[in-house]
Image (tube, rainbow, N blue to C red):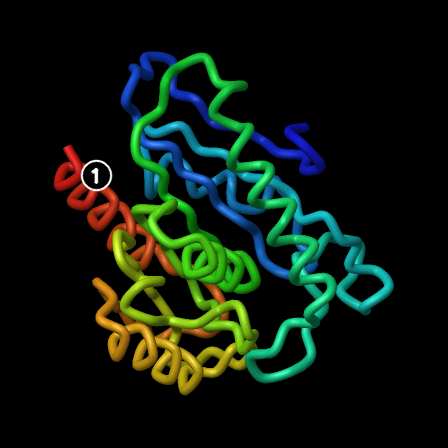
Amino acid sequence: MSGTLLYEQSIPEEVQDGAPLVVLLHGRGSDRFDLAGLAPHIAPGAVVITPQAPHSGVPWGYGPGWAWYRFLGRNRPDPESFEASQDALGAFLSEIRGTLPVRTGPLVLGGFSQGGVMSMAYALRNPGTVPLVMNFSGFLAEHPSVRPTPESVAGTRFWWGHGTMDPQIPFNLAIEGRGLLQSAGAELETRDYPIGHSISPDEARDAHAWIQAEVARLG
């Protein structure tokens, strides 16, 4: 545990100082183990951390797993639970590097569904603190603190993959959110897949290629 969040970690045996730090946030009703299996596919050689959301999903009908916020419909998170998780994520990110056996390099913050929503929101709420953000099938949250502007997108590059047949977070929300980011001048790479609410092998390969290219660009 770091701060208030439990987490799993994947650290390659021969990891060296400067390896990317990839933090992956799970989706609604899942847990810290869910995205751990992505580590060797999208970020081999990186330190991968998978924290667990702070809210039990049981009271909201999300099953026995965990959630980052209560979902109110369309692209709206419940403000109270959303704020609590954003605060917990900020504390987690400020502490986690100090617990690791190596001095990590660039931060890649990303996640699936609710995890993608949280990742994009955190970067926009804290401009310049997250160089690389990955969103797998999440939406851009409708919340007063989540505003794509030239100032909030500066210093961050975004990757957004989405299924065109997604029944959970419809593809039109991807079109809408991407448009808002692009209108603000964000550096955004988009990828679409003929899938539902999931991560396909092709998407994982594209994510891996993006991380490699962007980490190399950052030096």
Seen at 25% across and 66% down, the residue is 186
Residue count near mark 1 (Cα–Cα under 10 Å), binned few <14, some 14–19, many ≥20? some
Seen in the image, is 39 located left or right of residue 82?
left
Query: Can you say whether 106 is above or below 189 in the image?
Result: above
Seen at 50% across and 70% down, the residue is 197
Seen in the image, is 41 located left or right of residue 114?
left
On the rendered image, what quadrant is the N terminus found in?
A: top right
Query: Can you say whether 88 is above or below 193 in the image?
Result: above
Q: Position of residue 218 (x, y in %)?
A: 17, 38
Describe the element under mark 1 as helix, strand or loop.
helix
Seen in the image, is 20 located left or right of residue 123?
left
Which quadrant of the view contains residue 42? top left
Which quadrant of the view contains residue 159? bottom left
- Which residue position is annotated with label 1? 215
On the rendered image, what quadrant is the C terminus found in?
A: top left
Seen at 38% across and 13% down, the residue is 13
